[in-house]
Image (spheres, rainbow, N blue to C red):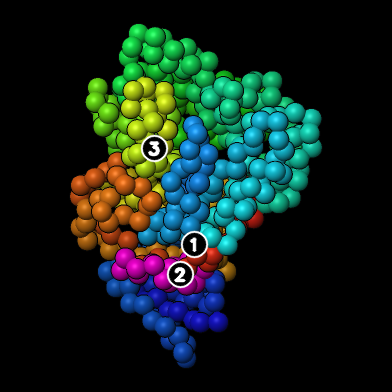
Amino acid sequence: MVSLLIKNGRVVTADSDSVCDILVDGETIAAIGKNLPMPAGAELIDATGKIIVPGGIDPHVHLDMPFMGTFSSDTHETGTRAALHGGTTTVIDFVLQKQGHSLREALTEWQGRATGTAVGDYSFHMAVTDFNPSTKEEIKDMVAEGITSFKTFMAYKGALMIDDAQMVGLMQEVRKHGGLVTAHATNGDMIDTLIAQHRAAGKRTPRYHYLSQPEVTEAEASGRFTDIANYTGVNAYIVHLTCEGALNQVRRATERNQRVFVETCIQYLLLDASLYGDDFEGAKWVMSPPLREKKDQQTLWAGINQGLVQVVGTDHCPFMWEQKQMGADDFSKIPNGHPAIEHRMELLFSEGVNKGRISLQKFVEVTSTNAAKIFGMFPRKGTISIGADADLVLIDPEKKHRISAETHHMNVDYSGYEGWELTGKIETVLLRGQVAVDAGETKVGRGYGQFIRRGPTIY
């Protein structure tokens, strides 16, 4: 096993901040301290002036996902490689059960895409779209496989959505086995009605995607989800929460001493609905839920600092511009999704830490540690400690750079952040002790990524 000594970096975790050295032995961290001796034969990285944080965990990505008659354009290979370039060493992808089919069939399909191809580490959530007696029996099997989180959709009727009766049954079964239930919390029936009304009136530009999903659709569903979770007693997590109304439902839940985990995404912190115009350019930001208003950004930043929002993910689900053109004449046919897996950490560092919106330790919490704890990977992942995987990210906090589709590694031909100037560049990334990215070059290959079996929530 190769040893690696990283010297003189500012090592930041969720609960510590000091200048010290890190000794890596094989895949794990062997020692942390000041003036560590150089082992014979070890490699040296001088991290003077650099910030070292745990490898990022993005718990919300959709790689090679079938959707609206096409597939998201990043595979497990290209997507995890791009993630590594952005400091994200582990992703959690969503396995989608097909209605009328088993969870096992879906898992086998996704394993066939990821096994031997992923460059970075990965795990799976199981999206349950057809909860029935057979599916119920499979929950314990999925937990035994290390898949301990189960996603529900409260929208996309006829494809992904389950009803409240199924939701209750799933939550009750998942609770028995110590798992977690997550929700895409928007009111699908109301959204479908508004979509039909806009289309009938000839209102078909991307702006009407946004207008078909007003804040109330998310607030109502978030409240309903938290209420059902409170009744069943299951660990509950709302994915990609975007707005003040939805977060207020979580605040309400805390008044009865309920714990609800909340994830927002980098785009909801930095982009807003002014990008939806009456030309087709707005299709770049057609995602569900849609971008919201400036006041919602303020709410989300505050929610992070208040501890109501624990995770910043991406909901990375990219489509080529040609794929987006499927909805050129009808917003409801635009594939929903946005590329962000590569830029989450640098955007949050530049716009969050450097602009004083969040602390550096809060940055570590919401990009890595909290997800590791909520999704059962801590302390193997999500921290810098002896025995943990040596997933380490070295950041040059002063280096300026520009985001562009010409230079990113995601398999998509546009960027939602084209031309953004950032301060703070990820220079070197280690994954399980190997230098995975250095100075913009990928150093590990297809298949280096491992499936991470997960345990219960320990947050």
Q: Nearer the viewer, mark 3 or mark 2?
A: 3
Q: Is residue 442 magenta?
A: yes
Q: Earlier in the sequence, mark 1 or mark 3?
A: 1
Q: With respect to residue 196, does 300 lie above or below? A: below
Q: Nearer the viewer, mark 1 or mark 3?
A: 3
Residue under circle 1?
A: 119
Q: Earlier in the sequence, mark 1 or mark 2?
A: 1
Asked whether the beta carbons under mark 3 and mark 2 sit within 8 Å of each other, the answer is no
Q: Is residue 314 magenta?
A: no
- How far apart marks 1 and 2 lie (CA) works out to 7 Å
**Drawn side of residue 95 relative to residue 59, left or right:** right
Residue under circle 2?
A: 444
Residue 70 or residue 210, whichever sits in front: 70
**Drawn side of residue 301 relative to residue 193, left or right:** left
**In the figure, residue 45 lies in which quadrant?**
bottom left
Q: How many marks on residues?
A: 3
Q: Position of residue 211 (x, y in %)?
A: 35, 18
Q: Where is residue 317 in the image (x, y as percent from the top left)?
A: 44, 41
Asked whether the beta carbons under mark 1 and mark 2 sit within 8 Å of each other, the answer is yes
Which residue shows up at 50% across the image and 46% down it? 64
**Drawn side of residue 348 relative to residue 145, left or right:** left
- How far apart marks 3 and 2 lie (CA) works out to 30 Å
Q: How crowded is mark 2: few (under 14 residues within 10 Å), some or many (20 or more)?
A: some
Q: What residue type is labelled 2?
A: Val
Q: Which amino acid does label 3 sit on?
A: Gln
Residue under circle 3?
A: 323
Which residue shows up at 37% across the image and 27% down it? 327
Magenta segment, which residues?
430-444
Q: With respect to residue 67, does 255 lie above or below? A: above
